[in-house]
Image (cartoon, rainbow, N blue to C red):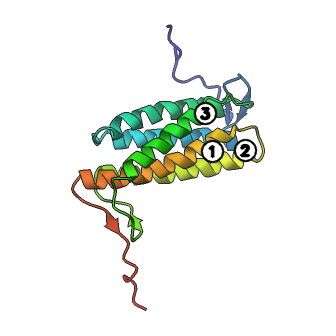
């Protein structure tokens, strides 16, 4: 396979536009580019989680998810979409949530983001995932977006929540519970 990028800078975006996967150009501030950029940001935050060497099966699942997110970014970069993310991808996330959640104690309080470096990074990934979902939903109101893209991001945020709980325990820091009595009444 040849090199895809012979030059890192092309100067074609100096006018505030960027190229889509089909060769057309749109503004860098468009909703479509916001969606692509937020999915890319999510992928980068997952890289931060992985940099903390999470235990298996979390590490391999997050690596697989990074590949899914690259596919999702490609799908979003095409005005007509491609449907690269499908029901099997969503089902895989649901199975992972169910498998992990069954071993966690039931929640009795809200959890504050934290619980060690890996867990905190996973909470950050969860919030970026929720933002990506909101932007993709907004894009779907004006453009063709396969519904599986939104469903995938919704399930992924659930998985990242339970992974943050697992990572807080694995790190030994434990979960940080919200204390609703912290404010004098």
Marks 3 and 2, Cα distance to the nearest angstrom? 16 Å
The quarter of the image holding the C terminus is bottom left
Task: Give the numbered dot on residue 150.
Answer: 1
Q: Is residue 40 visible?
A: no
Query: Comparing marks 3 and 2, which lies closer to the viewer?
Result: 3
Crowd rating for badge 3 (residues with CA inside 10 Å; few <14, some 14–19, many 20+): some
Q: From the viewer's side, name the closer residue of 31 and 181.
A: 181
Q: Pointer 2: what residue?
A: 140
Please give the name of the residue rendered at 64% of the width and 31% of the height, measured from the top-left corner.
75
Q: From the viewer's side, name the closer residue of 108 and 17.
A: 108
Q: Image quadrant of residue 112?
A: bottom left
Q: Image quadrant of residue 44?
A: top left
Please give the name of the residue rendered at 49% of the width and 37% of the height, measured from the top-left corner.
92
Left or right: 69, with 105 as reference point: right
Crowd rating for badge 2 (residues with CA inside 10 Å; few <14, some 14–19, many 20+): some
| Residue 62, x across and y down, in percent | 40, 38
The secondary element bearing badge 3 is classed as: loop
Mark 1 touching mark 2, by CB under 8 A?
yes
Q: Earlier in the sequence, mark 3 or mark 2?
A: 3
Marks 1 and 2, Cα distance to the nearest angstrom? 9 Å
Q: Pointer 3: what residue?
A: 86
Work out which residue is located at the far left of the displayed protein and give it. 172
Please give the name of the residue rendered at 29% of the width and 55% of the height, measured from the top-left corner.
168
Query: Comparing marks 1 and 2, which lies closer to the viewer?
Result: 1
Q: Is residue 78 visible?
A: yes
């Amino acid at each position: 396979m040849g090199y895809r990028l012979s030059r890192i800078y092309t100067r074609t975006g100096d006018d505030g536009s960027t190229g889509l996967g089909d060769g057309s150009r749109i503004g860098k501030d468009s909703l479509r580019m916001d969606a692509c950029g937020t999915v890319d940001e999510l992928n980068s935050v997952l890289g931060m989680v992985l940099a903390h060497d999470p235990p298996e099966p979390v590490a391999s699942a997050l690596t697989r998810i990074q590949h899914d997110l690259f596919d999702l970014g490609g799908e979003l970069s095409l005005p007509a979409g491609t449907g690269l993310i499908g029901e099997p991808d969503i089902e895989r996330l649901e199975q992972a949530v169910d498998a992990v959640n069954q071993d966690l104690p039931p929640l009795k309080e809200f959890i504050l983001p934290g619980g060690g470096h890996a867990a905190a990074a996973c909470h950050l990934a969860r919030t970026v995932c929720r933002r990506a979902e909101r932007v993709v939903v907004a894009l779907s109101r004006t453009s063709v977006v396969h519904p599986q893209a939104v469903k995938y991001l919704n399930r992924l945020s659930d998985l990242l929540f339970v992974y943050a709980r697992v990572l807080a325990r694995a790190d030994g820091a434990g979960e940080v519970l919200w204390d609703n009595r912290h404010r004098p009444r």
